[in-house]
Image (spheres, grey):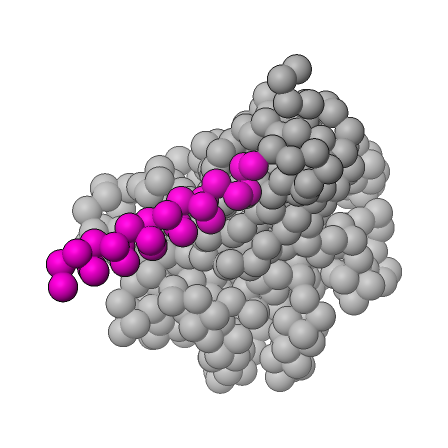
Amino acid sequence: MMPKTALLLGALGATAALVAIVPQAPSAGAVNPAAIQIDNFHYSPAMLVVAPGTTVTWTNDDDSPHSVREKDGKFKSAALDTDDKFSQTFTAPGEYEYFCSIHPYMTGKIVVKPAGS
Amino acid sequence: MADHDEGGLGKKASINRRGLLKCMAWAGTGVLWSVSGGVPRSLGLLGEAAAAEQKSGGFTFLQISDSHVGFDKPANPNALGTFQEAIAKINAMPTPPAFIIHTGDITHLSKDKEFDDADQAMKALKQKVYVIPGEHDVADADNGKAYLDRYGKGTKGKGWYSFDYGGAHFIALINVFNFEPGFKSAGLAKLGDEQLEWMEKDVKGLSASAPIVVLAHLPLWTVYQEWGWGTEDAPRALGYLKRFGSVTVLNGHIHQIQQKVEGNLSFHTARSTAFPQPAPGSAPAPGPMKVPAEELHSVLGVRTVNYVPGKSPLALVETPLGA
C-alpha cells in the first residue's frame, strides 16, 4: 500500500515538474508565453524582461476594471473586467512603458531583448 | 479639505469602521442643489430644499453620479437596479428638479449594452439629463467613440459644453481624456489646452455676478494624489473663474462626499448610485468597497441643488437611497 502511494505521488510530482518547465524551455522559434497579473491596482511584475517573439498576457484579478495602454499608443486593450485577459506579442527589441487608462497612476514596463544580450 | 458634515455624517477621516461607514453614507444616490443668490449650497433635506425653492422663485437641479451600469460584483451585484431606484426616488420628489446632471461613469465598461441599459433607465426621468463622461465611459478600445457617438452631438471638442439656466452659467468639462500617465508624474487627470482655451472664451463675456457651476467627473482639486484623485491643470481652469462671485464645482469619481471651500470657490464630490469607495488612504487601493448588503442603500445617494435668487448660497441636499 505505502510503496504504491509513494510511487503514484512520485509520478505526479514528475508530471507537475515537467509542466512547470515547459513554458520556460528555450527552444528556437517557439512562442514563449509570459504572464502579468493585475492585482490591487498594480501590474505584477511591474517590469518584465522577455525575449523577442514572446506573447505577454495580462489578467485582471481586481474587482475594478483596468486596461493596458502603451504610452505612445503602440498597443492598447479595451477595459478588462475581472478575469478578462489581454495578450500582446513583442517582436521588436526595446522598452515598452504602459499604463492603465482608467487609473493612470498604474504603470508597468516590458523590456524586450534577445536572451543572453 | 473640509468634510461634509450635514446630518452629523462624514466626520473627517477618522478611520474606525463605524466612522468609515458613516462617511460612506455619502457614497451614493444623488444630490439636490439649490442655486440662490448666485451661490449653490447643499440643503439638509429634500423637503427643505423644495420649500426654499418654492418661496423664492429659484430652481433646483439634481446631481447623480457614478451609476456604473453593468457592474455586478459583490460590492453591488445589481448597479443597474440601484440606478433605477435612484431615478424612481427622483421621480417621486414632491417638487421635481428643473433638470438632472450625471457627472460621469454612467457605465462600468463602456459597452453598448451598458449604455443602452443606462439610457433606458434615464428615459424614465421627466427632465433633461446633462451628462459628462467618466473614465469608465471612455474605456473602449476606440478611446471614447462609444460615448461620443451617443452623447457628443452639439458639444465641443471631446464632449465639453456650457449652458445657462435661470441666470446661472453651467460649464460641463471633460477630464477623462489626456490622462498624464504616472511614469514621472502623479498620474492625475487633465483638461488639456484645447478645452481650457475654449473655456476661457466661454466665460469671457459673462458678468462677474453670474453664478458659475462647473461639472467635471474627476475632482478639480487634488483630493488624494496617490490614487490619482485630482486634475493636474485644474488651477488654470479655476484661474479663469477667479473674478466671479460664486463658483460651484460638482464632481463625481470618488464615490463619497468631500467638500472644500476656497474663497468664492466651493468644491463638492458626490456619492455613487452603485457602490462606495474607501476614504482616501484608508485602504491599499481605491475600488469597489463591500459593505453589508443591508447597509448598501445608506451609502448610495443623489444630491439636489436649490437656486434661490437673493443672498443665500446654492443649497445642496444629499439623499441616501435608503432614506
Outermost residue to the top: A117
Total marks shown come to 0
B37 within the magenta span: no
Which residue is nearer to you in this view: B235 or B144?
B144
Q: Is residue B208 above or below residue B95?
A: above
Q: Is the magenta stretch mostly helix, strand or loop?
A: helix
- Tell me the quadrant of the picture where the C terminus of chain B can be found: bottom left
Residue A95, quarter of picture = top right
Identify which residue is drawn at 68% across, 66% down. Answer: B111
Identify which residue is drawn at 30% across, 72% down. Answer: B293
Q: Is residue A37 above or below residue B315?
A: above
Residue B24, quarter of picture = bottom left
**Left or right: residue A41 compared with residue B236:** left
Identify which residue is drawn at 34% across, 54% down. Answer: A12
**Residue A30's x, y, as percent?**
68, 41
Q: Tell me, yes or no, if residue B59 can be seen here.
A: no
**Residue B181's x, y, as percent?**
63, 32
**Residue A115's x, y, as percent?**
64, 23
- Tell me the quadrant of the picture where the N terminus of chain B can be found: top left
Which residue is nearer to you in this view: A58 or B176?
A58
Which residue is nearer to you in this view: A28 or B232?
A28
The magenta span reads A1-25
Identify which residue is drawn at 46% across, 52% down. Answer: A61
**Left or right: residue B215 compared with residue A9:** right
Residue A53, quarter of picture = top right
A17 within the magenta span: yes
**Residue B280's x, y, as percent?**
38, 40
**Left or right: residue A21 compared with residue B179:** left
Q: Tell me, yes or no, if residue A86 can be seen here.
A: yes
